[in-house]
Amino acid sequence: MGPGGIATIIAASALLIIALAVGYTIIRISRLIDEVKQTVNNVNRITATAEALTGKVSGAINTILDKESSVMKLLGTVASFAGRRGSNKDHD
């Protein structure tokens, strides 16, 4: 085998190693992209759930804090009673 044959074998081996390295890198990158997509989907689900929960909590708070609500009337009565009671202590 002459020097050209040996050089051809070395070049083919180097090309094979480079092809394997590029293939491995592409597989790893595709797996990384899949994991990122899955993470983004999970974050989107969590965000949607948080938005729905925020809407429910906001609606419940609006119902409780409605000016016509009996809860607000009760809290107003308790606050005025506590205010009168505190002012009576100051005068004693």
Image (tube, rainbow, N blue to C red):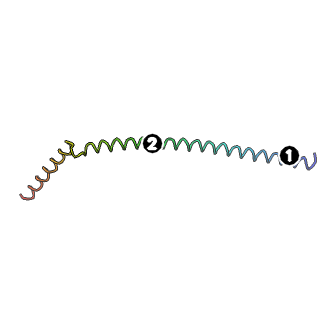
In this rendering, the label closer to the viewer, 1 or 2: 2
Q: Which residue shows up at 93% across the image and 48% down it?
A: 2
Residue 10 at x, y = what percent? Answer: 84, 48
Q: Quadrant of the C terminus?
A: bottom left
Cα distance in 3D space between marks 1 and 2: 55 Å
Side (left or right) of 76 relative to 5: left
Q: Quadrant of the N terminus?
A: top right
Q: Which residue shows up at 28% across the image and 45% down it?
A: 62
Q: Mark 1 points at which residue?
A: 9
Q: Residue 51 falls in which quadrant of the image?
A: top left
Mark drawn on residue 88: none
Residue type marked 2 = Ile
Residue type marked 1 = Ile
Q: Residue furthest front?
A: 68
Q: Which residue shows up at 20% across the image and 45% down it?
A: 72
Q: Mark 2 points at which residue?
A: 46
Residue 28 at x, y = what percent? Answer: 64, 44
Asked if disc 1 and disc 2 are in contact, CB closer than 8 Å, the reply is no
Looking at the image, tell me whether mark 1 or mark 2 is earlier in sequence order: 1
Secondary structure of residue under mark 2: helix
Q: Which residue lies furthest to the bottom in this view?
A: 91
Side (left or right) of 77 relative to 26: left
Side (left or right) of 87 relative to 35: left
Residue 41 at x, y = what percent? Answer: 51, 41
Secondary structure of residue under mark 1: helix
Q: Residue 60 falls in which quadrant of the image?
A: top left
- In the depicted view, which residue is nearer to us: 13 or 35? 35
Side (left or right) of 81 relative to 64: left
Q: Which residue shows up at 59% across the image and 41% down it?
A: 34
Q: Which residue lies furthest to the right in this view?
A: 2
